[in-house]
């Protein structure tokens, strides 16, 4: 039997009785057993419990009553999401024995809809980084998967699950989704509940899905947010909208092949996809010096909130010996941030958000590279000066959107000369999540985008 490649197609097959949730789940458990020894996307696989969950799902599917499109779908969870009676470690020895008594809010919703929880995926320790060691990129095991939701993106890209949940504080869904050649969605801030998710920075953290397609991300978003898609969501005709491609530093900082791919995607909207033939304009909302200052502001807010959270939970400094050297370095810098510096950073963010909203007010959708660079070699990240520089580059096109809280979707739009994926970032207005996802879905449909799970050991 040919297995479905997307969440949407799996939901249809399950509903029609063409496959059972148990058969689907057994398939993904076999793929995990075959591939994850090399990729190391999962921290915990709960095979027995997942198969047990398929029984309830298959019973619900046979009952001929309405069910969620997530019923019977195997899904993985970034190991920040609290899971009742299942370890939740945040990728850290600090929480190696942490077994929560209750589920995170979104996990409860998945259980209520009879989704099947395969296990917990790897994260950079406490989500505090743009890498996810030791997880490897399924497109090339010599490359990083990105972070901090690198385990979730790698699991999807390697065909080990149909979808996974991640978190995004400065790009942690979009960075690994782009590097691994899958689709990732950071919704509007607060659109998906973060209760029960281990925090990095409460005012910047977003929960969101990683899957093969924008349609799959939309299904997860709507079901978890408890929303009905807008009436014309599945129409392939775009309404009259104004689109801008981000230029200036978005062009000068990006590799040439990456920016050309984004320009090509923009031309598709202008010449073919939009029924109104809307003219694409170039917009430069941030100068390079401003971006550097904004990154300092972001790191003050993130660091202050993270340090407060770790102290409040009694992890730091009480268990400082259990942190990795990298996270401990971040924490020890963060505890030096004063309340006055934090307050000033919050004000600087307010000014930036006001500026962003003013400059982008004429546009419904912005297009930009997701990443300025192709996935780096793992060996590069083991050199501290280079690791820090790579982290700054990887954050450059993503973190401003966390500061603003606007929805942002990354979809694969091409590959580089060495065959590594390039991500197109589709940015919407705050609370315009459906339009952002719809634009991504139409782009993928126009390009006949087909999921291609990979496992390339070179």
Image: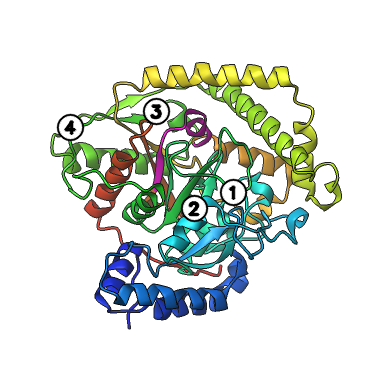
Q: In front: mark 4 or mark 3?
A: 4
Q: Point out the tag, 2 or 3, that comes first from the N-terminus.
A: 2
- Work out whether 425 lies above or below 457: above
The residue that label 4 is drawn on is: 240
* Cα–Cα gap, marks 3 and 1: 35 Å
- x%, y% of residue 224? 41, 51
Q: What is the quadrant of the N terminus in the image? A: bottom left
From the image, tell me which residue sits under label 3. Answer: 247
Q: Residues within 10 Å of mark 2 (few under 14, many from 20)?
A: many
Residue at disc 3, secondary structure: loop
Query: Callout 1: few (<14), some (14-19), or many (20+) C-alpha neighbours within 10 Å?
Result: many
* Element under disc 4: loop
The answer for how far apart the CA atoms under marks 4 and 3 are is: 22 Å
Residue denoted by label 2: 106
Quick one: quadrant of the C terminus? bottom right
Above/below status of 349 relative to 217 = above
Which label was assigned to residue 32? none
Secondary element at tag 1 = loop
State which tag comes first along the sequence, 4 or 3. Answer: 4
Q: Earlier in the sequence, mark 2 or mark 1?
A: 2
Residue at x 45%, y 56% (from the top left corner): 109
């Amino acid at each position: 039997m040919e297995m479905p490649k997307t969440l949407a197609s799996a939901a249809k097959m399950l509903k029609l009785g063409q496959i059972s949730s148990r058969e689907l789940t057994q398939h993904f458990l076999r793929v995990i057993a075959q591939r994850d020894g090399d990729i190391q996307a999962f921290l915990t696989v709960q095979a027995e419990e997942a198969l047990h969950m398929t029984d309830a799902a298959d019973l619900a599917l046979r009952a001929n009553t309405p069910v969620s499109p997530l019923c019977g779908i195997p899904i993985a969870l970034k190991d920040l999401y609290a899971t009742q009676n299942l370890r939740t470690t945040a990728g850290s020895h600090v929480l190696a024995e942490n077994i929560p008594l209750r589920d995170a809010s979104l996990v409860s919703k998945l259980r209520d809809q009879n989704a099947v929880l395969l296990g917990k995926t790897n994260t950079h320790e406490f989500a505090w980084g743009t890498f996810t060691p030791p997880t490897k990129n399924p497109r090339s095991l010599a490359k990083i998967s990105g972070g901090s939701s690198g385990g979730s993106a790698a699991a999807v890209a390697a065909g080990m699950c149909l979808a996974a949940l991640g978190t995004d504080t400065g790009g942690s869904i979009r960075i690994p989704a782009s590097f691994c050649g899958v689709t990732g969605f950071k919704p509007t801030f607060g659109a998906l509940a973060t209760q029960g998710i281990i925090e990095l920075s409460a005012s910047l953290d977003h929960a969101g899905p990683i899957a093969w397609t924008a349609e799959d991300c939309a299904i997860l978003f709507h079901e978890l947010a408890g929303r009905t898609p807008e009436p014309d969501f599945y129409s392939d005709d775009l309404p009259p909208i104004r689109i801008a491609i981000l230029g200036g530093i978005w062009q000068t900082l990006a590799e040439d092949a990456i920016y050309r791919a984004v320009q090509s995607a923009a031309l598709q909207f202008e010449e073919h996809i939009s029924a109104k033939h809307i003219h694409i304009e170039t917009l430069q909302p941030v100068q390079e010096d401003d971006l550097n200052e904004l990154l300092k502001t972001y790191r003050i807010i993130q660091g202050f909130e993270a340090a407060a959270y770790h102290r409040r939970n009694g992890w730091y400094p009480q268990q400082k010996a259990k942190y990795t050297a990298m996270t401990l370095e971040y924490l020890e810098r963060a505890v030096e941030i004063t309340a006055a510096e934090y307050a000033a950073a919050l004000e600087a963010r307010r000014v930036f958000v006001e500026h962003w909203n003013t400059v982008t007010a004429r546009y419904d959708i912005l297009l930009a590279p997701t990443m300025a660079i192709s996935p780096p070699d793992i060996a590069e990240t083991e050199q501290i000066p280079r690791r820090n520089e790579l982290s700054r580059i990887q954050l450059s096109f993503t973190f401003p959107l966390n500061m603003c809280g606007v929805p942002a979707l990354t979809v694969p739009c091409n590959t580089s000369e060495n065959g590594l994926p390039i991500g197109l970032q589709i940015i919407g207005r705050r609370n315009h999540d459906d339009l952002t996802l719809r634009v991504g879905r139409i782009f993928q449909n126009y390009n006949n985008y087909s999921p291609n799970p990979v496992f390339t050991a070179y």
